[in-house]
Amino acid sequence: MIVYFSGTGNSRAVAELLGHTLGEKTEFISPALDLTDEERVIWVCPIYSWGLPPVVVEAINGAKCHSHSKHYLVATHGDDLGNAHRRWRRIIEAKGHDAVAAYSVTMPNTYVSLPFFDVDSADVEKAKLAAMPGRVAEIAVRIEAEERADDVVRGAFPGLKSAVIYPVFKRYALSAKSFTINDSCISCGKCARACPTHNITLTDGHPSWSDHCTGCLGCYHICPTHAINRGSATRHKGQYHYPNR
């Protein structure tokens, strides 16, 4: 079984391709997963500020798993993941399960909420997307072989990023209060449909956010008129979502 979480489509694309390659069914993450019939569980998710999305941590902790299940992590990121894979391993092992291996797949950048962070250039985006199928195929072979490995891109200062920056992100960046909407909104509803936690409702044709935002920025990236922004930080930033999402 492949369990995945995705905001802008990168992790969903990886999960679906991996599922097709391995002959595994895929399921979107939920708070009360019953995985007791699954001897192999592959968790696919994005990395948020060098950590696991809290919604993923909650789902893993709440999942009912087979007593002898083997677990794998396939994380997507724009640049690197710090020590996020180690946090995943600790969570799985604390539940008494076997955390066999962790892998990462480099995908186009989506985080734009801070200065100096933006989407990739068109050339970089194209190169990352072109490399993804080969990387997923390699990971599939290694999962089938039950290879024990941590084959991830940790980047520079992984401990600092995951232990210091990620907790700050988790505390302050998951609120939807800073989202704004301007007059270019065309009331298409794409933002509400794209939200993985159903946190957006349309009021008089315009989006309003509730209090269970995951910080994925899916609503920002999917907006066809760039009407949605996160304060003033994203007004002149680019947008990205996985093609054909």
Image: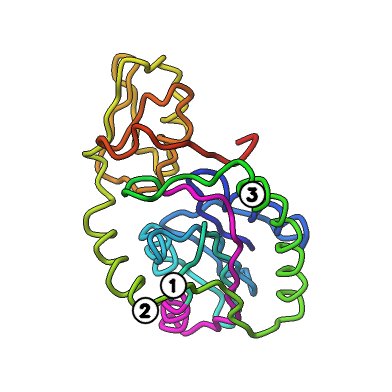
| x then y, percent, for residue 23 | 77, 60
Q: Colour scheme used in the picture? A: rainbow
Inter-mark Cα distance, 1 to 2? 7 Å
Residue 132 lies in magenta, yes or no? Answer: no
Instruction: Name the N-terminal-most of marks 2 and 3.
Output: 3
Between 93 and 54, the residue placed more toward the observer is 54
Residue 120 is left or right of residue 166, and the answer is right
Q: Depth check: give the residue in front, 63 or 226.
A: 226
Q: Where does label 1 land, which residue?
A: 82
Comparing 208 with 118, the one in front is 118
SS for callout 3:
helix
The residue depicted at 43 percent of the width and 80 percent of the height is 95
Question: What amino acid is labelled 1 in the image?
Answer: Gly
97 magenta-colored = yes
Mark 3 lies on residue:
13
What kind of element bears circle 1? loop
The spot of residue 41 in percent (x, y) is 60, 69
| Amino acid marked by disc 2 | Gly
The residue under label 2 is 159
Placement of the C terminus among the 4 image quadrants: top right
Type of the residue with mark 3 = Ala
Q: Please tell me which residue is depicted at 25% across the width and 36% down the height of the picture.
A: 231
Q: Which residues are magenta?
A: 86-111
> Which image quarter is the N terminus in?
bottom right
